[in-house]
């Protein structure tokens, strides 16, 4: 870890001043992996908030034992609602940014410093940890679904965005304060996609840092359902495009034919 990031970590560890960053992990039945993820994340950033989204296993206890602040949803409300609750809790502590990752082991907490370094260079931008290396490890259907989502979301956002379905992100606090709460979106993947569009329209154009693609053969099945969730995302994007007259300038920008002014 660089000297600058070491200073950030030390600032996080102190109780006398507001913590500059926090990690939010939405979790639904992640008892098998959550303690390991929390422990590794806390070696990078002291403040880790786990939102237990109505789990019926030992997720909440495992996360708390590993040192996370745990918020419990009374019933499963979907990833979007869990993310939103954790983000709002983090904002109350005066953070500069909120980082999110999944609790199933598909994200490597040791990559958190990469997002922090990018945030220091471009503090206004939403940052996506994009799975660029070893993408062939992902199941073919997931690669196809992610590619479709990337195309449509980039069009609606009016800028090229890579790996729009990565939940490993850094959100500037200034952006989060501009966002409305998620609607009734079971699963939450529509919420995460819509945030990218809203971020671009607010001038917080998404940027990417590269990470490796991790898919564990013995891991639990992903909550992301390629056909169902991709169609939900396309429907959301399609409605936004219709309201903007199909936004032809956005399409040209997303394809790189018109330069984006940042």
Image (spheres, rainbow, N blue to C red):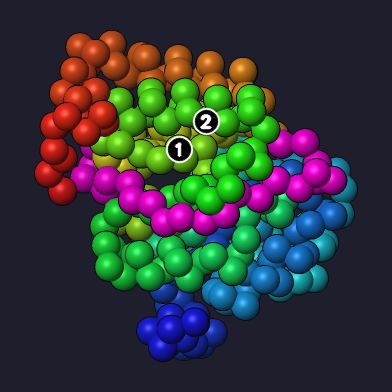
In this view, 246 is above or below 113: above
Q: Residues within 10 Å of mark 2 (few under 14, many from 20)?
A: some
**Pointer 1 with pointer 2, Cβ within 8 A:** yes
Give x and y (percent) for residue 254. Answer: 26, 31
- 141 or 171: nearer the viewer: 141
Which residue, given by chain and number where applicable, does mark 2 sit on? 146
Identify the residue at image location x=77%, y=36%: 221
Q: Residues within 10 Å of mark 1 (few under 14, many from 20)?
A: many
In this view, 41 is above or below 137: below
Give x and y (percent) for residue 246. Answer: 24, 13
Which residue, given by chain and number where applicable, does mark 1 sit on? 164
Give x and y (percent) for residue 91. Answer: 43, 61
Q: What is the magenta range?
A: 201-222
Q: Does 87 lie within the magenta span?
A: no
- 13 or 128: nearer the viewer: 128
Prevalent SS, magenta region: loop
**42 left or right of 178?**
right
Give x and y (percent) for residue 118. Answer: 35, 65
Identify the residue at image location x=20%, y=12%: 245
Task: Say whether residue 150 is visible.
Answer: yes
Disc 2 element:
helix
Image quadrant assignment for residue 247? top left
């Amino acid at each position: 870890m660089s000297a600058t990031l070491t200073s950030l970590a030390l600032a996080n560890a102190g109780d006398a001043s507001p913590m500059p960053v926090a990690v939010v992990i939405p979790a639904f039945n992640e008892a098998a992996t959550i303690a390991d993820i929390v422990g590794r994340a806390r070696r990078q950033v002291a403040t880790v908030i786990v939102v237990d989204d109505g789990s019926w296993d030992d997720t909440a206890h495992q996360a708390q034992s590993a040192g996370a602040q745990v918020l419990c949803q009374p019933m499963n409300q979907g990833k979007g609602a869990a993310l939103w609750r954790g983000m709002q809790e983090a904002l109350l502590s005066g953070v500069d940014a909120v980082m999110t990752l999944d609790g199933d082991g598909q994200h490597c907490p040791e990559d958190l410093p990469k997002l922090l370094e990018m945030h220091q260079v471009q503090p206004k931008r939403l940052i996506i940890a994009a799975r660029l290396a070893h993408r062939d490890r992902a199941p073919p259907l997931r690669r196809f679904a992610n590619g479709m989502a990337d195309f449509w979301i980039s069009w609606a956002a009016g800028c090229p965005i890579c790996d729009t379905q990565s939940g490993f992100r850094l959100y500037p606090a200034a952006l989060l304060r501009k966002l409305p709460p998620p609607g009734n979106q079971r699963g939450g993947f529509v919420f995460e996609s819509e945030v990218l569009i809203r971020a671009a329209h607010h001038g917080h154009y998404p940027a990417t840092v590269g990470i490796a693609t991790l898919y564990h053969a013995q891991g639990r099945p992903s909550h992301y359902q390629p056909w169902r969730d991709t169609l939900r995302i396309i429907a959301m994007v399609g409605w936004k495009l219709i309201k903007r007259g199909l936004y032809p300038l956005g399409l040209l920008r997303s394809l790189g034919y018109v330069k984006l002014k940042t």
